[in-house]
């Protein structure tokens, strides 16, 4: 028999990004009514739709992998259809005119080995080195005894400069948004393990045909509301107050945060639209906001210092609207040693003909340029590489300066469970196997949801 959850579980979720909405959807599917507070007008956070010149963009071009199983499951739970919502492509790394790797339709991990041995733009010796490296990683079960930088790992396994520049560096920056000299080898191996070593479809690249607010957070909000939960947008949380039970039962009394003890009877959230009381709080705000909300709570000092120690990395996306006939040779194509790292043809992906997106991940010299100068560099590169002589009708540069945490070795990431029972932490930066990704955010939200549920006896 299915047990209904106790009605005393009344969770609040701070932040309607992918982590918060994953927690909200999961709890709703378990029969729990949740309340979500989102400070922005729209849901989605760092993966949100942006309207510009009547054209639907995102705050940055995103890509999912087939191994993002929980994100894909939740999109379907709230009414999405993966095959309609995405253009699914077999893993293909194409650096225009320099390098090309395409996985054949063979079972994993054979597909990758065959792809590496057939890669164009590498010498036979380099292909053997890359395939040998992958075999060794499989032999180690993708687990290092001691974490190190990706650069150190590549040097240890004899991956020379050309191989690194064409294959491993673009892969590392795309996966971890961190340059190889700073990036955690173990986290990169976690991504390789899950995307390349299980099923062939895990390495598929999924390019969304709809914007990132519509893809999941908005559907999740509708799902939550259909089941009796509440979503407040434009309603930021300003403070978290713990409530203490009166001795011998009775009403709860509000106490200052500094007075709280771990036997809290719940939490009061101070919001821009009044105060509300809940049994659990899942703080799924971005790290800087989470630190601000938790700082006044003495028990959270350790968590706050973990959050404050995380460095951030940027991602820039340059959208360019060209005449409709302009297209790229592939829906997604990389450039070697250029400002534009990856180019996306939104015409081929989402029928937005002539709209191109250039993505520049992680720190670099592009940060010193003005937005107009950066766009001109991209326009120049498109002309040189693909002969696109037309000028774009418009361009829009979206600079997310704090896009993700810098995924360096041995990071001490805060756990979802905190020093205060029922005060939980979700977000891509919280403890987990993955770098800052949608799947990492979703998994953290699911862990928080599980922590709100009564333990199974
Ligand atoms: C440009 C860019 C490109 C990316 N590309 C990829 C990619 O290709 N693939 C991939 O997997 N990942 C990618 N990522 C990373 C991915 O977007 C993030 O890991 C993920 O969206 C983080 O989700 P989150 O819920 O943890 O945090 P957030 O998305 O930051 O959500 C936090 C939410 O809390 C809200 N909030 C803030 N303050 C308050 C408050 N006081 N009260 C209430 N709400 C508040 C915010 O408005 C926000 O909606 C990219 C990120 C960026 C920026």
Image (tube, rainbow, N blue to C red):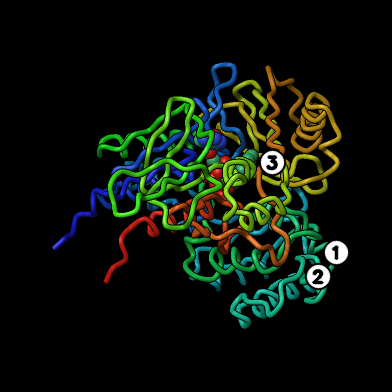
The answer to which of marks 3 and 1 sits earlier in the sequence is 1
In this view of the protein, can residue 286 be seen by the observer? yes
Q: Marks 3 and 1, Cα distance to the nearest angstrom?
A: 29 Å
Secondary structure, mark 1, is: helix
Secondary structure, mark 2, is: helix
User: Would you call the spot at circle 3 few (<14 residues within 10 Å), some (14-19), or many (20 or more)?
Assistant: some
Rendered image: mark on residue 161: 1
Q: Marks 3 and 2, Cα distance to the nearest angstrom?
A: 26 Å
- Residue 105 image point, x, y percent: 50, 63
The answer to which of marks 3 and 2 sits earlier in the sequence is 2
- Ligand 1 has an atom within 8 Å of the beta carbon of the residue at disc 1: no
Instruction: Give left or right: position of 377 versus 103.
Output: right
User: Would you call the spot at circle 2 few (<14 residues within 10 Å), some (14-19), or many (20 or more)?
Assistant: some
- Residue 14 image point, x, y percent: 47, 40
Q: Residue furthest bottom?
A: 139
* 137 is higher (above) or lower (below) than 165: below
The answer to which of marks 1 and 2 sits earlier in the sequence is 2
* 50 is higher (above) or lower (below) than 209: above
Rendered image: mark on residue 145: none
* 229 is higher (above) or lower (below) than 75: above
Circle 2 is placed at which residue position? Answer: 152
Instruction: Give left or right: position of 240 versus 345.
Output: left
Q: Quadrant of residue 129?
A: bottom right
Circle 3 is placed at which residue position? Answer: 402
Q: Which residue is at the front of the view, 429 or 278?
A: 278
Which circle, 1 or 2, is nearer the viewer? 2
- Residue appearing at x 80%, y 76% in the figure: 156
- Residue 429 image point, x, y percent: 60, 53
């Amino acid at each position: 028999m299915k047990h209904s959850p106790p009605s005393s579980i009344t969770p609040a979720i701070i932040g309607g990004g992918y982590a918060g909405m994953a927690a909200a959807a999961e709890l709703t599917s378990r029969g729990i009514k949740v309340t979500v507070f989102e400070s922005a007008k729209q849901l989605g956070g760092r993966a949100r739709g942006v309207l510009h010149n009547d054209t639907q963009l995102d705050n940055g071009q995103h890509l999912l992998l087939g191994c993002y199983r929980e994100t894909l499951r939740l999109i379907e739970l709230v009414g999405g259809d993966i095959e309609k919502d995405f253009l699914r492509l077999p893993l293909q790394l194409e650096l225009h005119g320099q390098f090309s790797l395409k996985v054949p339709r063979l079972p994993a991990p054979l597909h990758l080995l065959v792809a590496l041995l057939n890669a164009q733009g590498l010498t036979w010796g380099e292909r053997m080195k890359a395939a040998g490296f992958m075999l060794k990683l499989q032999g180690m079960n993708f687990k290092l005894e001691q974490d190190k930088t990706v650069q150190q790992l590549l040097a240890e396994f004899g991956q020379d400069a050309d191989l690194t520049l064409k294959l491993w560096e673009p892969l590392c920056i795309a996966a971890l948004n961190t340059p190889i000299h700073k990036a955690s080898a173990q986290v990169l191996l976690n991504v390789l393990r899950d995307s390349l070593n299980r099923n062939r479809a895990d390495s598929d690249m999924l390019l969304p045909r709809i914007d990132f607010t519509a893809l999941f957070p908005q559907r999740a909000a509708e799902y939550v509301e259909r089941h009796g939960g509440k979503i407040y947008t434009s309603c930021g949380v300003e403070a978290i107050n713990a409530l203490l039970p009166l001795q011998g039962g009775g009403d709860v009394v509000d106490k200052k945060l500094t007075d709280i003890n771990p036997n809290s009877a719940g939490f009061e959230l101070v919001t821009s639209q009044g105060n509300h009381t809940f049994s659990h709080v899942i703080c799924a705000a971005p790290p800087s906001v989470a630190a601000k909300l938790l700082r006044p709570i003495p028990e959270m000092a350790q968590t706050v210092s973990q959050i404050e120690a995380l460095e951030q990395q940027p991602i820039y996306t340059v959208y360019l609207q060209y005449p409709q006939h302009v297209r790229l040779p592939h829906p997604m194509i990389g450039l070697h040693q250029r400002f534009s790292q990856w180019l996306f043809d939104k015409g081929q992906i989402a029928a937005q003909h002539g709209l191109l997106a250039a993505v520049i991940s992680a720190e670099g010299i592009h940060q010193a340029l003005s937005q107009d100068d950066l766009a001109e560099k991209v326009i120049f590169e498109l002309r040189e590489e693909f002969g696109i002589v037309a000028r774009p009708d418009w361009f829009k540069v979206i600079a997310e300066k704090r896009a993700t945490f810098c995924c360096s070795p041995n990071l001490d990431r805060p756990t979802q469970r905190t020093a205060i029972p029922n005060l939980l932490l979700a977000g891509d930066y919280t403890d987990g196997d993955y770098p800052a990704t949608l799947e990492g955010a979703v998994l953290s939200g699911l862990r928080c949801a599980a922590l709100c549920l009564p333990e199974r006896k």
